[in-house]
Image (cartoon, rainbow, N blue to C red):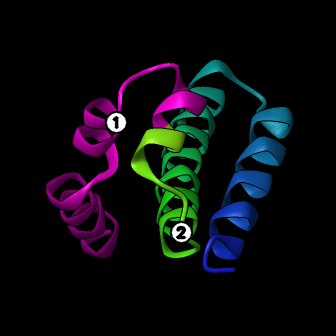
Amino acid sequence: MAARGSIKRVTQAVADVEAADNPVAALEAVRRLREAAEDLEFATVEESRQAGTTWTRIGELYGTTKQGVQQRFGGAARRRRFAEVTAE
């Protein structure tokens, strides 16, 4: 499961939010949590697609259309997200 690293990042970010001793530290941890959750979401969509899940089914899960999830997670969005993650 390619998403395993993202799960660890989510778990660590949640722990950091809980351990934050001031609002700025908490905000930084929440930002990392959001980014890790987005990475996990993209990785899980990718794994679902590779396992044969259709864009239509993914759209149903998100309460939107096939086109909506393709825009959010497909080709260009996936490449843009990958570029953001590898630039870190």
Task: From the top left corner, tell me how far across and down residue 18 is, in percent.
Answer: 85, 34
Task: From the top left corner, tell me how far across and down residue 15 is, in percent.
Answer: 84, 46
Vertical comparison of 35 with 80: above or below: above
Whether pointer 1 and pointer 2 mark residues with C-beta atoms closer than 8 Å, the reply is no
Whether 84 is among the magenta residues is yes
Say which mark, if any, is on residue 3. none
Q: Is residue 40 left or right of residue 22?
A: left
The picture quadrant where one finds residue 82 is bottom left
Q: Amino acid at mark 1?
A: Lys
Q: Is residue 64 left or right of residue 22?
A: left
Q: Is residue 41 left or right of residue 18?
A: left
Q: Quadrant of the N terminus?
A: bottom right
Vertical comparison of 74 with 22: above or below: below
What segment is highlighted magenta in the picture?
Answer: 59-88
Say which mark, if any, is on residue 66. 1
Q: Secondary structure at mark 1?
A: helix
Whether 25 is among the magenta residues is no
Closest to the observer, 80 or 57: 57
How many C-alpha atoms fall within 10 Å of the one at disc 1: few (<14), some, or many (≥20)?
some
Closest to the observer, 13 or 21: 13
